[in-house]
Image (cartoon, rainbow, N blue to C red):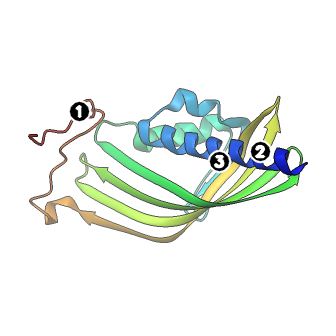
C-alpha cells in the first residue's frame, strides 16, 4: 500500500476497534454483528473464554453483560497496527476496564493487551479474531464500601445523574 492508503487503513481499523468497545459498553449487539466476519474467533482472558463464530462470540458477551445491573467501561489505546498485505492486518491494543455489577454487588477492574486480526472484505475492515491476555485483574465487593452508590446508569436512569446540581 502507498503511505496515504496505509494511514487511512490504520484509521479505519482504529475506528473499528473503537466501535467494538462502544458496542460492548452500550450493549449494542446488533451493531456489533456488523464488525465481525461470520467465522470470527475470540480468546478472552488468555483463552479461558474462547469461541468460534460471530454468533457464538456475541452470544457469550450477551449472556454475561446484557443485564441492567451490568455496567462497564473499556478504554483501548496505544494501537500497534501492522499489515500482512493489502487485505489483512494485526493489532495490539492496551485496554483498561472497569465493571460495576449491581446485581452481584461487585466491581472488577484490570488491564490487558488485546491481540487482533483484521481482514478487508467488500471494502470494509472487519474483525477476524480478537482476544486478550490480562496483565492484572482485581475484584472487590461493593458491600465492603458501604458509602459507594451508583448515581447514574444508562439502563436505570437513562444516563442522568441523581446528584443534585
For the image, the number of numbered tags is 3
Under circle 3, the secondary element is: helix
Residue at 73% x, 49% y: name it: 10
Residue at x-position 54% and y-position 27%: 30
Q: Position of 98 compared to 121: left or right?
A: left
Where's residue 37, x and y in %?
Answer: 73, 36
Instruction: Quickly name the residue at label 2.
Output: 9
Q: Mark 1 = which residue?
A: 156
Q: Residue furthest front?
A: 4
Left/right of residue 100 with respect to residue 3 in the rendered view: left
Q: Earlier in the sequence, mark 3 or mark 1?
A: 3
Mark 1 or mark 2: name the one nearer the start of the chain.
Answer: 2
C-alpha separation, residue under disc 1 versus residue under disc 2: 38 Å
Q: Residues within 10 Å of mark 2 (few under 14, many from 20)?
A: many
Residue 124, compared with residue 129, is above or below; it is above
Within the image, what quadrant is residue 20 found in?
top right
Residue closest to the eye, 7 or 140: 7
Q: For mark 1, does the 10 Å Cα neighbourhood hold few (<14), some (14 to 19), or many (20 or more) residues?
A: few
Q: Residues within 10 Å of mark 3 (few under 14, many from 20)?
A: many
- Front residue of 59/3: it is 3
Residue sitting at x 12%, y 43%: 163
Contact, mark 2 vs mark 3 (Cβ under 8 Å): no
Residue for badge 3 = 14
Residue 71, image quadrant: top left
Q: Residue at x 52, y 42 (%)?
A: 60
Task: Name the quadrant containing residue 142.
Answer: bottom left
Amino acid at each position: 500500500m502507498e503511505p496515504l492508503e496505509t494511514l487511512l487503513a490504520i484509521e479505519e481499523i482504529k475506528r473499528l476497534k473503537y466501535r467494538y468497545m462502544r458496542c460492548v459498553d452500550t450493549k449494542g449487539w446488533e451493531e456489533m454483528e456488523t464488525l465481525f466476519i461470520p467465522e470470527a474467533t475470540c480468546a478472552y482472558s488468555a483463552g479461558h473464554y474462547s469461541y468460534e463464530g460471530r454468533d457464538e462470540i456475541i452470544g457469550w458477551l450477551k449472556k454475561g453483560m446484557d443485564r441492567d445491573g451490568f455496567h462497564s467501561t473499556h478504554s483501548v489505546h496505544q494501537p500497534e497496527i501492522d499489515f500482512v498485505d493489502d487485505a489483512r492486518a494485526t493489532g495490539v491494543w492496551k485496554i483498561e476496564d472497569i465493571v460495576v455489577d449491581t446485581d452481584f454487588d461487585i466491581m472488577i477492574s484490570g488491564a490487558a493487551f488485546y491481540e487482533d486480526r483484521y481482514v478487508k472484505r467488500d471494502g470494509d475492515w472487519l474483525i477476524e479474531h480478537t482476544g486478550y491476555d490480562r496483565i492484572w485483574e482485581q475484584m472487590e465487593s461493593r458491600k465492603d464500601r458501604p458509602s459507594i452508590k451508583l448515581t447514574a446508569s444508562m439502563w436505570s436512569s437513562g444516563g442522568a445523574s441523581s446528584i443534585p446540581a
